[in-house]
Amino acid sequence: MITNKRIPVREQKPEIRRNNFNEVCLGYTKDEAIAEASRCLNCKKPLCITQCPVNINIPDFIQHIKNSEFELAAKSIARASLLPAICGRVCPQETQCEGQCIMGKKNDAIAIGKLERFIGDWSSEHLPTPELPKIQNGHKVAVIGSGPAGLTCAADLSRMGYSVTVFEALHKAGGVLVYGIPEFRLPKDTVVAHEIENIRKMGVKIVTDAVIGKAGSIDELMNKEGYDAVFIASGAGLPKFMNIPGENLNGVLSANEFLTRINLMKAYNDDYDTPVKTGKKVAVVGGGNVAIDSARAALRLGAEVTIVYRRSENELPARKEEVNHAKEEGIQFRFLTNPVAVIGNEKGWVKSLKCIQMKLGEPDASGRRRPVEIPGSEFLMDEDTVIMALGTSPNPLISSTTPGLEVNKHGCINTLEDNGLTSREGVFAAGDAVTGSATVILAMGAARKSAVAIDHYIRTKYNEQTHEDK
Amino acid sequence: MFVILEKKRLNPDVLEMKVSAPRVAEFAQPGQFVIVIPDKTGERVPLTICDYDRKAGSVTIVFQVVGLSTRKMARLEKGDAFADFVGPLGKSSELISESPEELSGKNILFIAGGVGAAPIYPQMKWLNSHGKKADLILGARDAGQLILVKELKENANKVFITTNDGSAGTKGFVTGPLNDLLLNRSCHYDRIIAIGPLIMMKSVADLTRSFNVKTIVSLNPLMIDGTGMCGACRVTIGNQTKFTCVDGPEFDGHLVNFEEAMRRQAMYKPEEKEHDHLCNMDLAVEESHSKSLK
């Protein structure tokens, strides 16, 4: 009999995990995964697949899990996705695959994400590491940025026989997977570093500490260093601020700074030199995943944390699972509240956050009801740290040093949707650099299309058969 | 690997290191900076570029030993390597975008305070190699703290030295000779470039404002990534917030909010002190060990 209830996944208890940075979700055991997979109805017209940005054949891999054929399940996912251990953890499944699951209409949707993660983790433990591609075609491609889009495109091109070099500005590869998403949601050594190591073993060269745009431009890569094509996957790394009074006071920082100190520089670990000042009372402004990540990180460093969001709970863009986790851990939420000024003490440190109450008005361009200020409703919140998590935009380092590369008014690179071709010949782009901050899986999906397009472009240029034609 | 090719002590607190970093050396320009990570648990430390040799693929940095990270760096010897060495970062000096004709008609004065002499040097050297020698006021706490004197003199026209205690040159601050030049000798300068401690740059900017002389300063605030990602290095220029790492490090000295910059500079001071204290203890222990071994 198929049960209506989802097999619960083991998690660290809130009162324990709020004091450590270890992963919250512990994942399914083999038996749990099989039991959960057995709930899948294996629909004739599976809606889950249509909602997956890379169209993983979800019922197929789930049926393999049900039959204990984990290797076949891994191969099934691998046809569509390169990073199941990562996507199984960070994808917003509730609005994608699981959101359309028939089981979810009346009961619990199948835990597709948790099953994907199970296979990702099983693969890294049991499957041999990938091998170098047998045939090299002699063409060189440069990839700028080693986040989800860059790694995916690099791996695909490498498999096609290209010699791929990834240029990473930071000292560690992984992009947002390393500097942005915290350890308690995505373990850095066991998951991220492992996946990157696999990509290296496939023959992809990753050069860290290389800031393209400063240490050489795209033109120099193509004209002097002999790259046939360049793929821009530089993400959206530029933090936004509110431009309200007091924002440069000591104790106001971007979520990017706070999370980079903690995730990339490991400031929470005494063995590392980089400090982080968290304070006792922290306000995090924003309602996305980055806001929730910042809040939960601050909590783990001993702070009392409040999330300040200008819309209501229904409009929170963050993943539901993460919001629930945050609530369980004791994060406070102040909805329909918007900061208007940061107030400092006599030494120039944050003393309080002046906010105004909001109400929801007519729907705006995003389709969500626009928050409107309630006049005269200002009030003060005592805080000693304010973290701005208002979203990010693409870094202009690349666009400003690449003549002829068209960007829109938000600084996002203009591309053709189905292949990532930019306004410059031989230059492709995907991921957050094109869309503005979005999800890992969207970046990955677009990067795979670009890899096919880059192959097509180079083969056409040299009058060779494309990889797909063979 | 970013191997240290040469190590030189310029004074008791200041070290010069020539580091193998071909990619940085190839693209470095006067006014830019690098980020150095001493070892795998280290911080990202922003440091100005003092010199570069494209052929040899090397970059020279000069740093004052002031905290945990610079102390770690100071312990490394020739043949050792830094974990990471990133750059060049920031915009190059405004000067180098000007044509030789534009420059030849201009009177330029540099003002260097303490280790500020290090980022001044590549600019004066660049100018000299383009047929232009500028004047220089070189200031330090005392004679022993003066660095790069010979190198700077070779590339300068008139040089004025000041020390706080009078142990070399004129006694006092760099603003002494500056005031003398502008007020008493009525020297006309088209541009002044001042690099040193924030308080020095502020004093210079305050003085030159009244003479209406364009004054460029170079800031070195706290930063993490150095590529525009963290926003820790934000400064107020006029009434706009700028990121030093991508919009600077050079700014119009008359528009910089120095009070805010000084306050933000001190943000992690208590932590640095704590580290310093621990490190001093480590050093004392190390020293007594080495003594007892002898």
Image (tube, coloured by chain):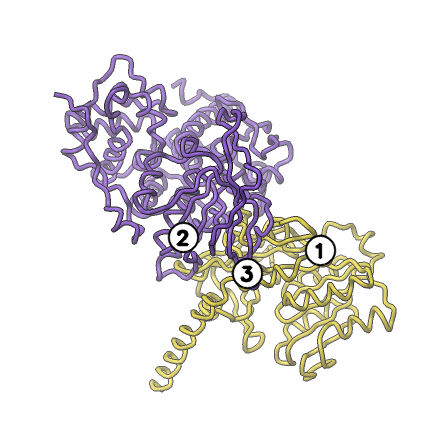
Chain colours: A purple, B yellow
**Marks 3 and 1, Cα distance to the nearest angstrom?**
24 Å
Nearest to N terminus: mark 3 or mark 2: 2
Which residue is tagged 2? Answer: A262
What chain letter is assigned to the residue under label 2?
A
Residue B23 located left or right of residue A134: right
Mark 2 secondary-structure assignment = helix
Mark 3: give few (<14), some (14-19) or many (20+) Cα within 10 Å: few
Callout 3 amino acid: Asn
Q: Quadrant of the C terminus of chain A?
A: top left
Callout 2 amino acid: Ile
Q: Is residue A72 above or below residue A373?
A: above
**Marks 3 and 2, Cα distance to the nearest angstrom?**
26 Å
Q: Residue at x 48, y 70 (%)?
A: B74
Label drawn at residue B255: 1
What chain letter is assigned to the residue under label 3?
A
Which residue is tagged 3? Answer: A345
Percent coordinates x, y for residue B235 in the rendering: 61, 54
Of badges 3 and 1, the one in the foreground is 3
Residue B264 in view, yes or no: yes
